[in-house]
Amino acid sequence: MSIVKKLKIFISERKEKLFWNNPDKWLAVIILDENLEQVYGKVRNNLAILERIPKPETGYSYLDIVTVEGPIGKQLFRDEEIDVYKAIGIYRRSNILTFTYNAIIPNSKDYFRLLDWFKAYDKKAEFPWSPNDKNMEWRKGYCTADNLEQANRILREFISLDKSRQVKDIEICMNYEE
């Protein structure tokens, strides 16, 4: 790749990062489909960047940029009301792959360690851990990775550190059309 092309890519990525550093809304609910599946994101100029991993069946991916309409309502987030927007369509796909996995993560500290473990690889994980349950049953989680091998490696390394953690059924989700 030529130095000019590398420079253009760098400038483009820098502009995008600066764009999202000053959003209209730092935290908003983005409704993704008619089933009211939702994620959180930032909103600016009728665009939203999806900052949570959407369920694959919605057709969206983590860090997709979508056009939105709204706000169409409010929703309580912790003790604060935040705006709700409706996704209209994809503005730009992130092309970040989403994987599903089943896991047993019994300890609350392990839940946060899992999130940090993926963050150390510059990836993201989500898992439905509950402080009210014993968390000893298999639950479905989502994660991002460059490929299935990387998702497997990250999850297997994480569970190898504690025998009470378990993982199985790591699969890629075909959540967008090529």
Image (tube, rainbow, N blue to C red):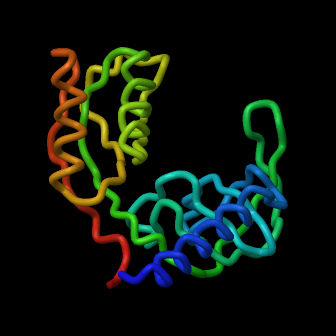
Is 144 in front, or is 6? 6
Q: Nearer the viewer, residue 60 or 63?
A: 63
User: In this picture, is 136 found above or below 114?
Assistant: above
Q: Quadrant of the N terminus?
A: bottom left
Seen at 21% across and 15% down, the residue is: 162
Left or right of residue 86: residue 124: left
Q: Determine whether 119 is above or below 91 in the image.
A: above
**In the image, what residue occupies the spot 45% across and 65% down?**
61
Query: Would you say 60 lies left or right of 40 here?
Result: left
Q: In the visual, does 149 lie left or right of 143?
A: left
Q: Is residue 2 above or below residue 133?
A: below
Q: x, y percentage for residue 30?
A: 66, 61
- The image quadrant of residue 164 is top left
Q: Quadrant of the C terminus?
A: bottom left
Q: Quadrant for residue 97, please give it.
A: bottom left
Image coords of residue 28 (percent x, y): 73, 54
Give residue 160's quadrant in the image.
Answer: top left
Q: Position of residue 94 (x, y in %)?
A: 47, 70
Most foreground residue, 136 or 154: 154
Q: In the drawing, does residue 178 fall left or right of residue 154?
A: right
**Residue at horizontal 28%, vertical 51%?**
100
The residue drawn where x is 15% and y is 46% is 169
Q: Give the farthest residue toward the front.
A: 3
